[in-house]
Amino acid sequence: MDSLTKSAASRLLFTDDYKNAPYWQDDAEDLNIPTHDLPADADVVIIGSGYTGLHTALQTIAAGRSTVLIDSGEIGHGCSTRNGGQISPGIDPSESTLAKTYGLEKARRLRQEGENALSWIESFVAQESIECNFERNGLFHAAHTPTHYDQMCREIEHLNKTENVEAFAVPIEDLRTELGTDTYYGGVVFTKHAAIHATKYHQGLVKKALAAGVTLISQCQATSVIRHTEKSSNQFSITTAKGIIKSRDVMIATNGYTGQLTPWFSRRVIPIGSYVIATEALPIELVDELFPSRRVVTDSCKVVYYYRTSPDRTRILFGGRVSANETDPTVSAPRLHEQMVRIFPQLIDSKISHSWTGTVGYTFDTMPHTGVHNGLHYAMGYCGSGIAMASYLGMRAGQKIIGDPAGVTAFDNLPFPTRPLYRGNPWFLPAAVSWYAAKDKMESKLAAYSASRGKIA
Ligand SMILES: Cc1cc2nc3c(=O)[nH]c(=O)nc-3n(C[C@H](O)[C@H](O)[C@H](O)COP(=O)(O)OP(=O)(O)OC[C@H]3O[C@@H](n4cnc5c(N)ncnc54)[C@H](O)[C@@H]3O)c2cc1C
């Protein structure tokens, strides 16, 4: 196909009312956030208006600390209104991997924090009556090859015994009880995972923060943070696009958008774009066939795909990384559609109504990090699983700022690794993504070939 025909074919994939914006935004309320000049000082200044920053703010304001929360874009400009809405415990390394570095007892405490975050967010949204379609129906983790399926079965046997994870295997014969596809080789169900409406949750937090008296200031990029050495109750000066503000405490809640404002953090966080599409509204029979179990889904590819239905079960939200370099949502959309149709051929004629991207914050040890560095409080590096963890660590950081010992977590002040020559620009990413995507494709082909010959790959 020449490039002109290709682009015409791509255009046919989009609905007439296609939006280059998150699907979640269609349900956003107009919050009428009052506009403020930047105050001259505050007890606490929080940089970043996602789940991390808002949860920190809710704690500090409740303790009577004047709190100003700023963002370089609109309030909620970052991942917290752009994610896939799948809630996991958010700790990637296994207990045994962590034990090699930290010892078994600490490894268990770190893993436990993932569970703590998940249960905490559930009780938070219930207690605070935040209407955000929170549902705990579990996750189906689909096996991309028979070898992955075997590995998964071994892992869950161990996890069920040692970490009370509650997972069970779904063999290939039963795949259609979980997903309307024949692409996978079975998978496992993790029963505790949950789903949420990203923007309704974020807006619920914004409303709470406003009601409690937090000052929210958008379009207010912080460009420098200086810590004064002389004794003063306001030890920090923060220069922003809207002037200078002094404060006693500063919270860095910039995650995947961490930049040269804080070079030490920027050397430790790897910004990676993730991409999502939403389909047009589909017939309910089709949605029921594709997603009979109401669970959210990921697969075992190294370059992972994650997907689910919209909370009202009218659409499919399908996400992943489909480009070695960062790209535009209009470019990622047809590629995501192609991958979606590879898994669900039934969606070949379904159009794309929304496509969007956001920047997740990875770390070199694939762990979230929190603590205090040079007097700056921080929580970041959720490695693409931050809905529960950002909320939880943001809340704990707020407790630490007000001097509440409950704020200390197992993550506090873990070594936060960087790499030589890394300054915040992940120059190695395109090569890594290309390599892993090629490996996923090769494994998939090999598995299909072996299956066709009646062998196990
Ligand atoms: C496409 C996508 C899908 C995802 N899917 C999932 C999922 O299914 N499940 C899950 O758990 N997680 C998912 N995530 C990750 C999750 O959304 C994040 O981990 C979480 O929202 C992080 O929240 P945060 O508050 O730390 O950061 P963010 O919400 O990203 O907020 C950081 C803010 O800092 C601001 N900022 C940066 N620098 C400055 C500055 N100098 N001055 C002022 N403001 C600044 C930015 O503008 C931004 O608004 C996904 C992310 C993306 C992008």
Image: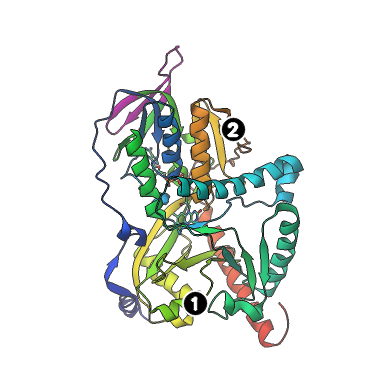
Q: Is residue 239 magenta?
A: yes
| Residue 297, position as x, y percentages in the image | 54, 66
* Alpha carbon separation for disc pair 1 and 2: 43 Å
Residue at image coords 42%, 48%: 129
| Residue 414, position as x, y percentages in the image | 63, 36
| Precedes in sequence: disc 1 or disc 2 | 1
Instruction: Identify the residue at the far bottom of this view.
Output: 453
Residue at image coords 47%, 35%: 263
Classify the position of the N terminus by image quarter: bottom left
| Residue 330, position as x, y percentages in the image | 34, 66
| Residue 457, position as x, y percentages in the image | 71, 77
Left or right for 451, reference 60:
right
Task: State the residue position of label 1.
Answer: 290
Name the image quarter holding residue 211. Answer: top left
Please tell me how crowded label 2 is: few (under 14), some (14-19), or many (20+) other residues with Cα within 10 Å.
Answer: some
Q: Is residue 172 above or below residue 242?
A: below
Left or right for 185, reference 349:
right
What amino acid type should be assigned to the residue bearing mark 2? Val
Left or right for 180, reference 160:
left
Name the image quarter holding residue 251. Answer: top left
Between 280 and 9, the one lying in front of the other is 280
Between 444 and 71, the one lying in front of the other is 71
Q: Is residue 136 above or below residue 338?
A: above
Residue at image coords 43%, 19%: 235
Residue at image coords 42%, 81%: 348
Task: State the residue position of label 2.
Answer: 408
